[in-house]
Image: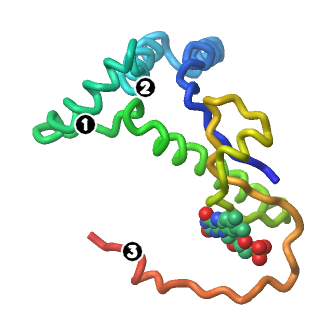
């Protein structure tokens, strides 16, 4: 069983990531400066949540006149779930390529799972993925027709 979890404090590791990318020449110092600014703006709650408050209240108003992306500080759990689900997707595809079977499982008691694994409080379990050898005769499945689940615009 692999538990995919996301760390609410991930943005605290920004400097570590930037330093690694700078040392490898993967980003320029100017871009690192830009990222420092944007990540702070997107993620920080500020003392007593004061930054969270204006981000949660004023940004929806400002959005009425200019396009503004979702701010992670306000929608942290949703953002985290998307990022972790993408990691799980890559893992599941890699497992498939290696001849292994996986299934995604959501819908568990996150508190109990966190206690069972002794996860730090900032770590949020998002998805559990068992991995193994799939049956050679998989059960019959159906699919909703493509035209019923796609909106063409
Ligand atoms: C506790 C639990 C949670 C599950 N959550 C999801 C889910 O969030 N999304 C999904 O597509 N399938 C979910 N499934 C279905 C599994 O991915 C899988 O398709 C199903 O268990 C059938 O596989 P099996 O015959 O090997 O058990 C869940 C299954 C279990 C048991």
Classify residue 104 as left or right of residue 81: right
Q: Tag 1, which secondary structure?
A: loop
Q: Tag 2, which secondary structure?
A: helix
Q: Earlier in the sequence, mark 3 or mark 1?
A: 1
Residue 17 in which image quadrant: top right
Q: Nearer the viewer, residue 55 or 132?
A: 55
Residue 62 in which image quadrant: top left
Residue 57: where, in percent of width, then height? 22, 32
Question: Which residue shows up at 82% across the image and 59% down it?
Answer: 131
Residue 114: where, in percent of width, then height? 71, 40
What residue is shown with label 1? 68
User: Is the C-beta separation of discs 2 and 1 under 8 Å?
Assistant: no
Residue 129: where, in percent of width, then height? 74, 57
Q: Tag 3, which secondary structure?
A: loop
What residue is shown with label 3? 150
Residue 132: where, in percent of width, then height? 87, 63
Q: Which residue lies furthest to the left in this view?
A: 65
User: Is the C-beta separation of discs 3 and 2 under 8 Å?
Assistant: no
Disc 3: CA contacts within 10 A as few (<14), some (14-19) or many (>=20): few
Q: Earlier in the sequence, mark 3 or mark 2?
A: 2
What residue is shown with label 2? 43
Q: In this view, does 94 lie above or below 54?
A: below
Q: Earlier in the sequence, mark 2 or mark 1?
A: 2
Residue 148 in which image quadrant: bottom left
Q: Which of 33 and 30 is in front in this view?
A: 33
Disc 2: CA contacts within 10 A as few (<14), some (14-19) or many (>=20): many
Question: Which residue shows up at 40% across the image and 21% down it?
Answer: 45
Q: Quadrant of ligand 1?
A: bottom right
Question: Which residue shows up at 66% across the image and 44% down it?
Answer: 111
Classify residue 36 as left or right of residue 126: left
C-alpha separation, residue under disc 3 versus residue under disc 2: 32 Å
């Amino acid at each position: 069983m692999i538990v995919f979890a996301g760390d609410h404090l991930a943005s605290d590791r920004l400097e570590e990531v930037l330093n690694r990318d700078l040392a490898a020449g993967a980003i320029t110092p100017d871009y690192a400066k830009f990222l420092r600014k944007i990540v702070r703006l997107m993620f920080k709650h500020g003392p007593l949540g004061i930054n969270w408050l204006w981000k949660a209240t004023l940004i929806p108003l400002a959005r009425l006149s200019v396009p503004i992306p979702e701010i992670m500080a306000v929608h942290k759990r949703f953002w985290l779930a998307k990022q972790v689900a993408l990691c799980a997707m890559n893992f599941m595809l890699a497992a498939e390529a290696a001849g292994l079977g996986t299934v995604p499982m959501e819908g568990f008691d996150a508190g109990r799972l966190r206690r069972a694994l002794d996860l730090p409080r900032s770590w949020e379990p998002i998805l559990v993925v068992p991995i193994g050898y799939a049956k050679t005769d998989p059960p019959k499945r159906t699919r909703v027709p493509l035209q019923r689940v796609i909106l063409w615009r």
